[in-house]
Amino acid sequence: MSGYLTTHVLDTARGLPAAGLKIRLYRLDRAGRVKLAEMATNSDGRTDSPILPKEDFAAGTYELVFAAGDYLRATGQSGAEPLFIDEVPIRFGISDAGAHYHVPLLLSPYGYSTYRGS
């Protein structure tokens, strides 16, 4: 059985899921960075399907890039330009091609955190 990759974005400043936040997924290797997917979060702060589904899942190094600045501007939380937080890249490794990897983002205008979720 193959694994898959999911994500979830929570707006910790507003205490809500971050709906409409655009996310890009890249695979990194010796040849460079290859875009695999681009999605936006739904009303629950999740993508409607795995950002990297089972049929495309493989061990390797990946990068999720969250368009946090666009989201913060759209929700009236941006403050003065340039934004303190704009794009949020999270680079991570997948070593077990049979596992579920969940990479959530907890976001506010002045900070963020992530972890390997379940």
Image (cartoon, rainbow, N blue to C red):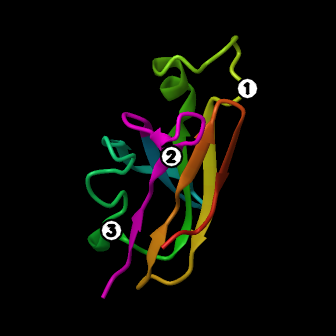
Report x, y in % for residue 84. Answer: 73, 26
Q: Amino acid at mark 2?
A: Leu
Instruction: Judge the density around disc 1: few (<14), some (14-19), many (≥20) Cα neighbours within 10 Å.
Output: few
Question: Does the magenta-highlighted stretch encompass residue 8?
Answer: yes
Give the labeled residue for mark 1: 84
Which tag, 2 or 1, sits closer to the chain's start?
2
| Residue at the spot 31% in from the left edge and 42% down from the top edge | 42
Residue 38 is left or right of residue 85, and the answer is left
Disc sitting over residue 10 in the figure = 2
SS at mark 3?
helix
C-alpha separation, residue under disc 3 versus residue under disc 1: 34 Å
Position above or below: 76 against 43 = above
Report x, y in % for residue 69. Answer: 57, 26
SS at mark 1?
loop
Q: Where does the magenta region start and end? A: 1-22
Instruction: Judge the density around disc 2: few (<14), some (14-19), many (≥20) Cα neighbours within 10 Å.
Output: many
Give the labeled residue for mark 3: 56
Q: Name the front one of labels 2 and 3.
A: 2
